[in-house]
């Protein structure tokens, strides 16, 4: 009996320390330097996965409540800015997480600052050169991925540094250009203390959908805990017009829109 009590105390002690350790770790990321890890352990790894949804990639909010997180990507230097879409979100008071690529930020520095100062929006990291995250140069849609683990680290880290220089905040969520990864690079991002954010609802198919397609897709696939993927860099696409029709209807059906940072994220549908 006595031994059991000692055992229990020991296990409680371990659990407490473990929880404390996790909390301390989570709190200790205040500066981009806190994300630096040794890349040597990954150099001998040979990935077998290449995709958008495997374990380690967060695709859902951990809830069965009628909430959805809208995310909008801004991808590259040659792209534009869908100001109509952003104004619509402001008018409707709909929050959104914006994944900005470094090249887009460099092209629109003033707009980026304005978006950062708006509490409706949370700015997160869509990479340095908008490359799929790979440790061996895998490609998708004709876009070459990062060539090795150092390149993959730079793809993530470089834009964390830029965002930090603008709003003095370490962006904790990362989505690679094209949203494609291998599992070694996903492990690296997770080990840095960041989260890899995928999606459960492909909203505008890389901003190729018409307004009608955007509307239909959203109304068909909307579900509690969804992370949706849209674009805010292609005003000529149907994204804004489609969402202008869909979002008020979803609100009427009882859906609320939230920021991903306010929820625990999970890989599989939680209900
Ligand atoms: Zn993109």
Image (cartoon, rainbow, N blue to C red):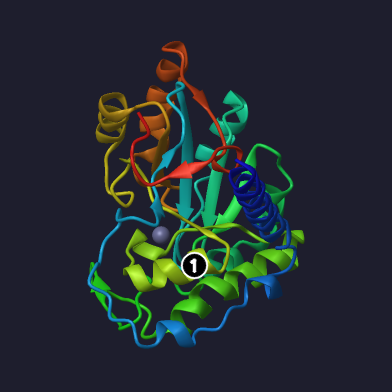
**Secondary element at image label 1:** helix
Q: Is residue 16 left or right of residue 180?
A: right
Q: Could you tell me which residue is drawn at 50 percent across and 84 percent down?
A: 39
Residue to which mark 1 is pinned? 189
Indicate the quadrant of ligand 1 in the picture.
bottom left
* Relative image position of residue 231 (x, y in whole percent): 42, 48
The quarter of the displayed image where residue 194 is located:
bottom right
In the displayed structure image, the side of residue 94 where residue 233 appears, left or right: left
Instruction: Looking at the picture, tell me which residue is in the foreground, 73 or 3.
Output: 3
Say which of 77 and 178 sits in front: 178
Tell me which residue sits at (73%, 63%) in the image: 166
**How many residues crowd mark 1 within 10 Å: few (<14), some (14–19), many (20+)?**
many
Name the residue rendered at 45%, 61% in the picture.
75
Q: Is residue 185 visible?
A: yes
Find residue 181 and report its horizontal and vertical position in percent: 33, 66
- Which of these two is toward me, 147 or 77? 147
Tell me the residue at 38%/39% (across/down): 239
Q: Which percent across, then down, holds residue 271?
A: 35, 28
118 is higher (above) or lower (below) than 44: above
| Residue 47 place in picture, x, y as percent | 27, 75
Q: Quarter-wise, where is residue 219 in the image?
A: top left
Q: Quadrant of residue 165?
A: bottom right
Q: Is residue 149 above or below residue 11?
A: below
Side of 116 relative to 132 (left or right):
right
**Residue 232 visible in the shown view:** no
Quadrant of the rendering where the N terminus is positioned: top right
């Amino acid at each position: 009996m006595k031994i059991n009590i000692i055992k229990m105390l020991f296990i409680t002690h371990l659990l407490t320390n473990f929880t404390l350790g996790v909390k301390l770790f989570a709190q200790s990321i205040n500066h981009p330097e806190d994300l630096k890890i040794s890349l040597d352990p990954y150099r001998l790894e040979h990935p077998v996965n290449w995709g958008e949804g495997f374990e380690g990639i967060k695709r859902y909010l951990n809830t069965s409540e009628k909430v959805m997180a809208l995310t909008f990507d801004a991808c590259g230097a040659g792209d534009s800015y869908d100001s109509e879409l952003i104004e619509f979100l402001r008018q409707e008071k709909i929050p959104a997480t914006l994944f900005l690529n470094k090249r887009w930020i460099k092209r629109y520095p003033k707009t980026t600052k304005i978006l950062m100062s708006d509490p409706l929006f949370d700015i997160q990291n869509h990479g340095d050169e908008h490359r799929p995250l790979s440790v061996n140069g895998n490609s998708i849609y004709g876009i070459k991925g990062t060539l090795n683990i150092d390149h993959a680290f730079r793809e993530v880290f470089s834009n964390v540094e830029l965002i930090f220089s603008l709003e003095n905040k370490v962006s904790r969520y990362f989505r690679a250009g094209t949203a494609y990864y291998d599992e070694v690079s996903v492990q690296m991002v997770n080990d840095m203390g960041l989260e890899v954010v995928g999606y459960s609802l492909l909203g505008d198919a890389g901003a190729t959908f018409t307004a009608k397609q955007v509307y239909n897709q959203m109304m068909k696939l909307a579900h509690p805990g969804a992370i949706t993927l849209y674009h805010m860099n292609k005003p000529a696409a149907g994204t804004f017009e489609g969402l202008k029709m869909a979002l008020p209807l979803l609100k009427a059906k009882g859906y609320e829109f939230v920021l991903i940072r306010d929820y625990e994220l999970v890989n599989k549908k939680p209900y």
